[in-house]
Image (cartoon, helix red, strand yellow):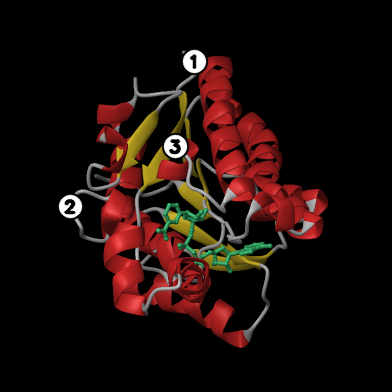
Amino acid sequence: MNLSGKRAIVTGSNSGIGLGVAEELAKAGADIVLNSFTNRDEDHALAAEFAEKYGIKATYIQADLSQATEARALVSKAGGCDILVNNAGIQHVAPIDEFPADIWDRIIAINMNSAFHTSAVALPFMREKGWGRIVNIASAHGLTASSFKSAYVTAKHGVVGMTKTIGLETAGQGITCNAVCPGYVLTPLVEAQIPDQMKVHNMDRETVIRDVMLERQPSRQFVTTTQIGGTVVWLCSDYAAQVTGTTISVDGGWTAL
Ligand code: NAD
């Protein structure tokens, strides 16, 4: 797959899935805009490392995607993009009647609303070129629910709905919009859930991983960030030019149950 000359923005890409997706897009030759809410030397060093390792243009743009204006400014500052991967996301685990309202709002803002704002600004650039790819990193939780993850499940279902709508609004314009729905990928986000899950289920770490987290993932294997990145690269290829407004599950069989 040759994506050279394409500019890809990957939100939330200084760790986890976003970093893995950015790496696979860079390997395919795309120029990369990395993003997170931090503005550390190591964030900018990561972009320099990408440029050197993959022989592409790479920059890091700080934007706090809980803020609509910053989400929109990210795409403008990048000068638009050919590929937009809406990946940034956070999680909080609590029963709905104890779920803090401010954390609910933050999850909806980062996990769902930011994809609306970035897509809205990116689309005119894509239309001008007659080519574009929007890939939303949703989740198996965009298709099914789990207890104690109400805000996350709500946001991810919303992202799946937004994906379908953007797919319809861009059909026939050389632009596609799809959602990748991963099962459990062992990243810092998942790692951070383990103590909460241990508390909620009163279990030790190993039991939570085997019987709670991977209980619904029939393969009983974590998905890798490279596998998610490879799926995104495929969605950017000509093979997938007629794949739009849909979801691709990469979940070890979770949603087949
Ligand atoms: P992660 O915590 O490793 O990465 C999340 C990224 O989002 C980081 O780069 C973080 O800095 C960034 N981010 C967080 N808040 C932000 C903000 N306000 N503004 C800008 N960036 C922000 O987590 P991950 O597991 O790699 O998750 C990435 C995406 O994949 C999320 O949308 C998550 O819901 C989704 N997902 C993860 C899994 C999994 O098992 N890890 C499964 C399904 C879906």
Residue at the far bottom in the pictured view: 41
Front residue of 79/225: it is 225
Residue labelled with disc 3 = 144
Lower position in the chain sequence, tag 1 or tag 3: 3
Report if the CB atoms under discs 1 and 3 are less than 8 Å apart: no
Q: Which residue is mark 1?
A: 171
Count numbered badges in the picture.
3
Earlier-in-chain disc, 2 versus 1: 1
Mark 1–mark 3 Cα distance, whole angstroms, equals 26 Å
What is the secondary structure assignment of the residue under circle 3?
loop
Q: Is residue 155 above or below residue 10?
A: above
Q: Is residue 47 left or right of residue 217?
A: right
Above/below status of 256 relative to 76: above
- In the displayed structure, would residue 44 be above or below residue 200? below
Secondary element under disc 2, as helix, strand or loop, is: loop
Label 2: few (<14), some or many (≥20) within 10 Å? Answer: few
Classify residue 81 by image quadrant.
Answer: top right
Residue 26 location (% of width, % of height): 36, 59
Q: Nearer the viewer, mark 1 or mark 3?
A: 3
The residue beneath circle 2 is 219
x then y, percent, for residue 113? 70, 42
Q: Where does the image place residue 223, in percent across and percent down from the top left?
A: 27, 57
Q: Secondary structure at mark 1?
A: loop
- Specify the farthest residue to the front: 202
